[in-house]
Image: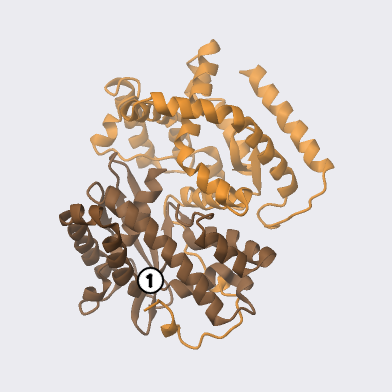
Chain colours: A orange, B brown
Amino acid sequence: MHNIRSIISLIMLALLLAGCAGTQSRNTDPENDPWEGYNRKVYAFNEGMDKVVRPIAVGYDKIMPDPLQRGVGNFFRNLDAPVTYVNLVLQGKFRESADTFGRFLINSTVGLLGFFDVASRLGIPFYNEDLGQTMATWGYDDSRYLMLPLFGPSTFRDGTGRLADSFYHPVGRVIHGSNRWGLWIFRGIDTRARYLDQDSELQSAYDPYVLMRDVWMQNRQYQIYDGDPPMLDYDLYLEDDYSLEEPAASGGQ
Amino acid sequence: MKFRVLLILVFVSIFSNGLSAQAQADDPVSLIERITGQIFTDVTENLEEYTANPEALEDLVRNDLMPLLDINYSARLILGRAGRGLSKEKVDEFATCMTNLLINRYSKALLQFSSEIKIQVLPQRGDLNPKLTRVRTRVTLPNGGEAPVDYAFHKTPEGWKAFDLVIEGISYITTYRNQIMPEVQANGIDSVIERLNTGQMQLAE
């Protein structure tokens, strides 16, 4: 674990330095993404890596029958339960943490190591928490965007949280040796396969980097607020200057 | 993801058959609840007919959907400051080509998925704010998963109209605004309209 982790830190450090050395030609969101110059470099690096990863994910997606792929998704999701449990406790959500504990017990046993999500069928709700979300609920709610090598979109807060969470994640604590790496790589491919359908949209975007950032940041906010984020202030978006006297003119015929 | 196409579909279904709905209770939640049922019944019952003649479905979507969407308002929100100095006709043209794209995508999704998904409209929370009211729904997908889909409504002289779709916290307006506004500023509105019309830009996720 420490080997790979130090390799990743090295890559990140190298990219960080590269980012500092470069000039920041563009800054599309100075408030939330002050490191855009660096982030775009990492984004380009990840796109390069994707030239290798994507074909594998495509092949995986082709040979895996949907129900099996669903099972794999359930399996990995179940492995995250201890992390969610700890963070629910840290956020003082004790009823939810009890649910998560129950889920983990049931799915790991009756659900055959998590392949079957028996708990959901029993009506036990699913929660998703991590240290990044915990820190956000504690008041650290406006962290800057940070593109991570290999892992993709994050913030400084969430990247740090992710690293801390990984120290007690079941993969690594319970599963040892090369199995662990196999498992992480497997998960990476499985995760990549789940986003294949969105590739064409990303590619056709005017600025794919910004699209990924927007989608990720909004969805992250949604997670932090447990599905109930504050409403947008659409008034701020109306910056045009021709006067539309009455909205009656809109809506088509 | 097919998933997103599915959710977009829900959006369509909910706002179709709008004309018949206007005579009845017209608050956003009733509107959604009633129309959801109507459109799903219609498409499910006439699935073969619509499959054979997709243009009929497009017409249905176009006629019934449009009165319930405030597309021009959406277009103005998306254009933002890039809309400055544009004539109203240009903004209308932009809105129309967005509409055409949406109708096309919606109709296709409708044919593919209408029998497989379920929609639950959650009760209204708080008072109806004429400037901005959120209607929350939960969509049950074929794989058993649930996806949250919210709609932003405002009240116009013609009644309540929806102008934004928010899926899992991701606002359609915000996301496209951040793509289209800089593109219009860099290349001009005509180039963007051209790109939308030729299908080089996929509007719906």
Subunit ID for the residue under disc 1: B
What is the count of numbered marks?
1
Q: Nearer the viewer, residue B115 or A145?
A: B115
Q: Quadrant of residue B54?
A: bottom left
Q: Is residue A36 above or below residue B17?
A: above
Q: Which residue is at a point 44% across and 43% down the rendered structure image?
A: A92
Which residue matches tag 1? B69
- Residue A128 at what x, y percent from top left? 43, 40
Q: Which residue is at a point 36% across and 79% down the rendered structure image?
A: A253
Q: Is residue B12 above or below residue A236?
A: above
Identity of the residue furthest to the top in this view: A177
Specify whether residue B15 is in view. no
Q: Which residue is at a point 23% across and 74% down the rendered structure image?
A: B21
- Residue A167 at what x, y percent from top left? 57, 25
- Residue B131 at what x, y percent from top left? 43, 77
- Residue B174 at what x, y percent from top left? 53, 61
Q: Tell me the quarter of the image containing the N terminus of chain A.
A: top right
Would residue B16 appear left or right of A179 to someone viewing this image?
left
Helix, strand or loop under label 1: loop
Specify whether residue A242 is in view. yes
Identity of the residue furthest to the front in this view: B52
Q: Nearer the viewer, residue B42 or A120?
A: B42
Residue type pointed to by label 1: Leu
Identity of the residue furthest to the bottom in this view: A245
Disc 1 crowd, CA 10 A, few/some/many (<14, 14-19, 20+): many
Would residue A39 appear left or right of B40 to someone viewing this image?
right
